[in-house]
Image (cartoon, helix red, strand yellow):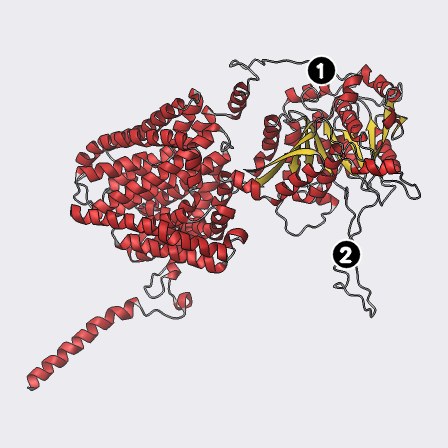
Amino acid sequence: MATITATVATTLLSTVTTSSAPAATTTVAPQGGILDGVLPNTFSTSNPIQLFIIQAGIIIILCRLLHYPLSLLGQPRVIAEVIGGILLGPSVLARVPHFTDNIFPTASMPVLNNVANLGLILFLFLIGLEVDIRLFTSNWRVALTVGLAGMILPFGLGCAIAWGLYHQFHNDPNTVEISFGIYALFIGTAIAITAFPVLCRILSELNLLGTPVGVTVLAAGVGNDVIGWILLALCVALVNNGSGITALWVLLVAIGWVLFLVFGIKPVFHWALRRTGSIQNGPTQGMIAVTILLVLTSSWFTSIIGVHAIFGAFLVGLICPHDGGFAIHVTEKIEDLVTVLFLPLYFALSGLSTNLGLLNDGITWGYVIGVIAVAFSGKIIGGTLAARATKLVWRESLTIGVLMSCKGLVELIVLNIGLQARILSQRTFTIFVVMALVTTVATTPLTKWLYPPWYQKKLDQWKRGEIDWDGKPLESSNQSDTLSQIQDTGIRRLLVYLRLDSLPSLFTFISLLGDENVTPKARSGEALDSNANDARKVSISPSRPLEVHGLRLVELTERTSSVMKVTEGDDYASRDPVVNAFQTFSRLHDVAASGNVIIAPEDSYARTVVEQASVQESDFVLIPWSDVGSNKDDSTTPFKAPVENRFSGKAHLDFIQTALSKAVCNTGIFIDNKFSTSSKVRPTLPRTISHVSMRSLKGAAIPPITDKSHTIFFPYLGGVDDRVALRFVLQLAKNPLVTVTIAHLSYIEGDDEIVGVSEGNLDSVSPESISKDIINTEITAQDSSLISTLQSSLSPELVSRVTFTKVSVTASSAAKQATDLAKESVGKNPRNAGDIVIVGRRHPKLPASLRAADQNNTEYDMQKTIGVFGQSMAMSELKASVLVIQAGGSGHAH
């Protein structure tokens, strides 16, 4: 008995000692951390966050550093993330001694893998949100043709090359024994799939979404994306289930889950969203929680039935509504966390599994080249022929084929699923990663080469019948600035760049152009007879109303939600409050109005404005100067910026300069100085005891403007810009509420200060453009007699409201004298609706001394942007707004 007791005691003691020893070494750590000598990269199962933060920091920093130079080459962010992962993996940094053991030890991989896969689930949910089935249904014929051809041929070629891959590499380690049919299904899917999110990004950055190429690719990409995920789910189900009966049951249950989501969950979910106002006013926090729970539940269910968890997340994204911008709002809530933290972690894990060292023989490299060739040829040939069958020209069709060959991050997700399911070995996984990188990197430069902006413009003109295929115009016209043209030609198609901070002034400006038959308000003390009263009640519309197109620009950022706004452009424009207010106001003032919202990168704002002016065949483009000197228009709390800040913003100056240098029609830069509005001064409180408080003055109403008159001052020096400005002034003068003062500035004979230096010499454009500007802006003999001839031939209704004055100036004093004359003419009536000073932009006789090397940089930049006259007027203390006009082309109204 004693022997038995001793044996049991010895056994228990040894068991306790054995089990407690590892616990002491793995879970108990000094509480002082690095102060107790513990290395910061030490991995502890009880506190894994310590090493995880180091891993995440290294991955995010490396990916961001790589993305900057690659973004300059037009490459999407996923390229930097994949290359960053490859650098961290066995191909590069893992070869450094102890790097993997210290930074990515095997014990820490489950934590990193869990976080990365959670991010992958959320990302697939975002992809589902981004897929708008309406794009497919609205263009279903083209989408079906291009989408099917873009999948069938690559899928067939993928199955063909799968035969060689299967027999060459199926004995590699870490693979499962599967039939060739399942293997071919996976390889065919991997070759046939298109990266819809990356495709949207490329189309947005190249400004192709509104072209036939962009519409076709997006519609086909939606169908391609959905079919690709279905095929992948089928493949995973077949691999994860040994018997055919089990796989069949898995597929049936998956189909049942899809039907349950569509017909059971979706109606209730949409009802709850409408009930809580989440569609109309943006998702509430409670509905965001419900949405995330749906994503996690669906992912869990598809995972436990033997299909990957990402498919459940993708399905929930598909059933979310796009009405009211709900999908965009949900994306905005979670996209930054996913794209900044989770996705880089996932692709870093992908890179850790990519070993370029396994591509170590001729046969392997032969398959690398073969897979790349199959991926390119299948997509390009299939997409090109299908697009050509829809009556697109060959170059458009070839561009569509190239875009459909883009693989991107979707391909890498597919490959990682294949690696996890052990369909692919590490060697074949690396082969396909190289293929994905090559096809994605090549997409943007090939598209730019095949479908450049000049070709898009030429093709658009050819389709409209303006030119023949060789680029020769089918119609030609020769116009000259005759007196009759100055008097009779007016603006009929106006393009307005809409900014929220300039909206009140733009409204007043449009009303001046549209309401040419209003009855002016009687002066105090004057009586109106019955005929005048009747006339005021009658709305007389012009025979051909002014057509105004409002263009609203929203910055295209790296965010997915920004790209979604582009793909849902029509819906976004219909919901935009600025465009809606602009259209309503214009129609109430006898103006035919249309509006559009374009989401574009900030550096392409000017190009977008110019392109839209060409598309709309505009006579005139009106661009307001920002109140805060910035291109951004998302300020919820307006504030007044100092003059120095307003006129020194480099990005805004570059935008104005580029818009003027590339202008295709007459263009005006409108610098608002409270035109049509009265400045509201914030009240101050006395330091003594008072019953007046800031709150008591908070609701004070601004009285209406009783005097709706406007005074316009225009200094005429000569040149094509001044002739176009003169035409514009006379059109405004047709409005009975407008009085005009035209100052004819003539150079003093024998002025030896006059030098033939063009302001074009300040422009940061090519020498060819400068010489063209010098010729276009020459003062001709016609300019000297034009004003006197015009004055003697004014119509009776304009004689009383248009005043002419002649002033002799020298070249060096012209700008100062014009500014002094403007101060004498405008800003005298603080109760009217606002005054305007209108000037031409370019005056070649102004001397270079105004642009001395020691002058203020802001003045120099302003002179380079809007000319010497414009700078002098805008930066003086004029109590009036300034409109700087530049002639487009040869200076004629188009």
Q: Position of residue 400 (x, y in %)?
A: 41, 28
Q: Residue type at mark 1: give it.
A: Gln
| Residue 199 makes an appearance in the image | no
The residue labelled by disc 2 is: 682
- Secondary structure found at label 2: loop
Q: Position of residue 231 (x, y in %)?
A: 28, 40
Q: Residue at x 20, y 74 (%)?
A: 17
Choose top left, top right, bottom left or bottom right for residue 862: top right
Residue 332 seen in the figure:
yes
Q: CA distance from mark 1 to mark 2?
A: 52 Å
Q: What is the x, y in percent for residue 328?
A: 49, 47
Q: Which residue is mark 1?
A: 479
Residue 327 higher or lower than 816, as above or below? below
| Direction from residue 135 to residue 191 in the image, left or right | left
Q: Which mark is residue 261?
A: none
Seen at 88% across and 25% down, the residue is 796
- 52 versus 327 height, above or below: below
In the picture, measured across the screen, residue 682 lies left or right of residue 348, that is right
Q: Residue furthest right?
A: 525
Q: Residues within 10 Å of mark 2 (few under 14, many from 20)?
A: few
- Is residue 122 toward the left or the right of residue 358 in the image? right
Quadrant in which the N terminus appears: bottom left
* Nearer the observer, 385 or 48: 385
